Image (cartoon, rainbow, N blue to C red):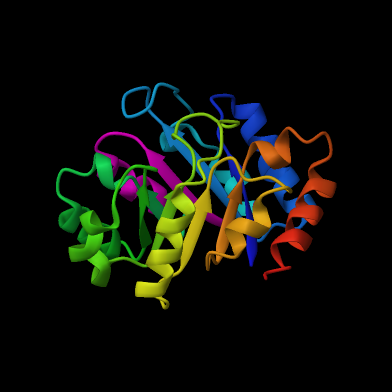
Amino acid sequence: MEIIPAILTNDEEIFKRQIEQSVAIGAKTVQVDFTDGKFVNSKTLIPDELDSFVISKSGLILEAHLMIENPEKFFATLYALGFKRIAPHFEALLDPAKALSIAHDYGLEIGLALNPETQLEKIESFIQQINFVLFLTVVPGEQGRSFETTVLDKITDFHSQYPDIPIEVDGGIKHDNIQTVANTGADRIVVGSGIWHSGNPQTAFNQLQTAASTVI
């Protein structure tokens, strides 16, 4: 089970600091959240505004969670920055098959991010083209929103139907609910406020890893 810190900010200094802290606490992967103020209300830094030097020297596996309209417009930039994985929102894609194809042309691993209310039937026809699924357990756009337990059954159903497709879960995950999330069959768990707002990112990261590894 991998714990992935999530960075969601419109401040370049916070971005740099949280990249450095992700390395310091022992993370292997970091998820950078991008929002445009349209698909969701909040607005973050966009890929063109990221410090490529800070990213390249970190040694982290980079993943982009794209909570934006027309996310395909950033695929080339993300590839150039060294991102390995991208997760645009299914709900934001006008032509999912085309977007998946473009990502694969760049050699990017691509997953589909799903809002809590989006049903699995919506993505069935794209299963053969995706590398993973990112399940949102909160309404996307801001860190610190309430965890929606109704998504857990959907994650369990997906794991039962497609046991070989990696599952990520993101949103409202903290020490007191991470074991329940891990029990659904999730492979990677994304945590933002549960790490950065904890008062001690190192301790929070370690506790999350320990709790997630205790799968019933």
Q: How many marks?
A: 0
Q: Is residue 122 above or below residue 142?
A: below
- In the figure, is residue 165 to the left or right of 183? left
Q: Position of residue 126 (x, y in %)?
A: 22, 64
Q: Quadrant of the C terminus?
A: bottom right
Q: Position of residue 145 (x, y in %)?
A: 56, 31
Q: Quadrant of the N terminus?
A: bottom right
Residue positioned 26% across, 39% down in the render: 92
Segment tinted magenta in the rendering: 58-79
What is the quadrant of residue 13 in the picture?
top right
On screen, residue 102 above or below 192: below
Drawn side of residue 111 relative to residue 127, left or right: right
Whether the magenta-drawn stretch holds residue 62 is answered as yes
The residue lying toward the viewer, choosing from 75 and 88, is 88
Q: Position of residue 208 (x, y in %)?
A: 74, 54
Residue 115: in sight, yes or no? Answer: yes
Res 82 visible? no
67 is within the stretch colored magenta:
yes
Write the residue at 49% across / 58% down.
Answer: 168
Whether residue 51 sits left or right of residue 72 in the image: it is right
Residue 194 in the image: state x and y as whole percent: 69, 40
Quick one: 211 or 109, which is closer to the camera?
211
Q: Residue at x 25, y 72 (%)?
A: 128
